């Protein structure tokens, strides 16, 4: 991957997962790379950011779990009436422990945490995992208590990590949201997701996740897909819940006893 870490003066060191990247100290050198990471020092706490050219302009993003779109969704998202909550079967005050095996930017995980679930996340891209880890560390120091516990990230390949879970570590629900090619290059494909795609590609092996998840979840596997996408691994779910532009395919394995 052709990325660099831009070390501005007084910048903290590159996060551990980015240590193998070439480090440049001069902004003009970053044009040799497809994109670059840097610490945004404008805030009291440094924020890890990623920047890359998109549509001939430089675009960048920083992940923040405690404000902006993620916080808005948490405060105004409709609680347990929303589709993601129904897909995960969140009723009777049930607070399952969920393994999000395709963590990405952690937005769905943050939403599920705000609905009372415990979250473990796995992200295989060291680039995306660095951005998410940085956001989690800041959230843990913030006054949003939700993220102070039961919200953890592992960097690695889910297919292998899930196979190695012990019985005590078995998740109630495994949640999957692998990349799926967008229908068009329209503005509807958000800038952040386009930048993430630059970092991770297309997830061509996504189908492999479903059989492993079905073997290791206790109660259900929930798969988020664009409405136009076929079922993951071409496997028909127990039910589907349509949302705006998306669909949650739910594979019910058993029901918790309340
Ligand atoms: C569409 S994004 C997930 C977005 C996420 N649901 C959110 O709310 O931000 C898919 C992510 O899953 C990761 N991924 C795909 N397959 C994986 C696997 N087998 N193991 C771990 N991570 C995986 C990709 O690297 C990518 O970052």
Image (tube, rainbow, N blue to C red):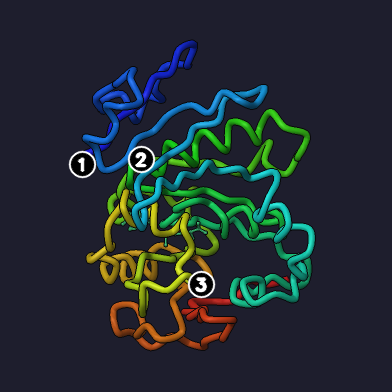
In this rendering, position of residue 162 left or right of residue 32? right
Disc 3 designates what residue?
A: 220
Foreground disc of the pair 3, 2: 2
Disc 1 designates what residue?
A: 1
Instruction: Give the mark nearer the N terminus: 1 vs 3.
Output: 1
Q: Residues within 10 Å of mark 2 (few under 14, many from 20)?
A: many
Residue located at (47% from left, 70% from top) = 187
SS class, disc 2 = helix
Circle 1/circle 3 CB separation < 8 Å: no
SS class, disc 3 = strand
The quadrant where ligand 1 appears is bottom left
Q: Quadrant of residue 37?
A: top left
Q: Which mark is residue 127?
A: 2
- 139 w.r.t. 213: above or below: above
Residue located at (36% from left, 54% from top) = 54
Residue 87 at x, y percent in the picture: 59, 76
SS class, disc 1 = loop
Instruction: Please state the total of marks drawn on the protein image.
Output: 3
Q: Quadrant of residue 93?
A: bottom right
CA gap, disc 1 and disc 3: 35 Å
Foreground disc of the pair 2, 1: 1
CA gap, disc 2 and disc 1: 10 Å
Q: Residues within 10 Å of mark 3 (few under 14, many from 20)?
A: many
């Amino acid at each position: 991957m052709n990325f660099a870490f831009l070390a501005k003066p007084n910048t903290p060191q590159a996060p551990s997962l980015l240590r193998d990247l070439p480090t440049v100290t001069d902004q003009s050198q970053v044009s040799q790379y497809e994109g670059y990471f840097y610490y945004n020092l404008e805030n009291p706490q440094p924020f890890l950011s990623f920047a890359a050219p998109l549509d001939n302009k430089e675009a960048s993003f920083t992940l923040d779990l405690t404000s902006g779109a993620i916080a808005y969704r948490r405060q105004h998202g409709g609680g347990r009436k929303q589709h993601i909550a129904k897909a995960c079967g969140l009723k009777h005050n049930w607070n399952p422990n969920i393994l999000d095996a395709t963590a990405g930017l952690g937005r769905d995980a943050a939403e599920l945490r705000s609905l009372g679930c415990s979250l473990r996340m796995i992200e295989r891209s060291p680039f995306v995992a660095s951005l998410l880890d940085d956001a989690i560390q800041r959230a843990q120091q913030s006054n949003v208590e939700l993220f102070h516990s039961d919200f953890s990230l592992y960097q690695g390949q889910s297919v292998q990590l899930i196979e190695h879970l012990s019985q005590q570590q078995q998740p109630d629900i495994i949640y999957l949201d692998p990349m799926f090619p967008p229908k068009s290059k329209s503005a509807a494909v958000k800038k952040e997701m386009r930048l993430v795609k630059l970092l991770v590609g297309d997830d061509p092996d996504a189908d492999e996740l479903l059989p492993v998840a079905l073997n290791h979840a206790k109660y259900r596997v929930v798969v988020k897909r664009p409405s136009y996408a076929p079922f993951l691994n071409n496997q028909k779910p127990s039910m589907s819940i349509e949302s705006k532009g998306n669909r949650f395919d739910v594979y019910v394995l058993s029901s918790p006893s309340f």
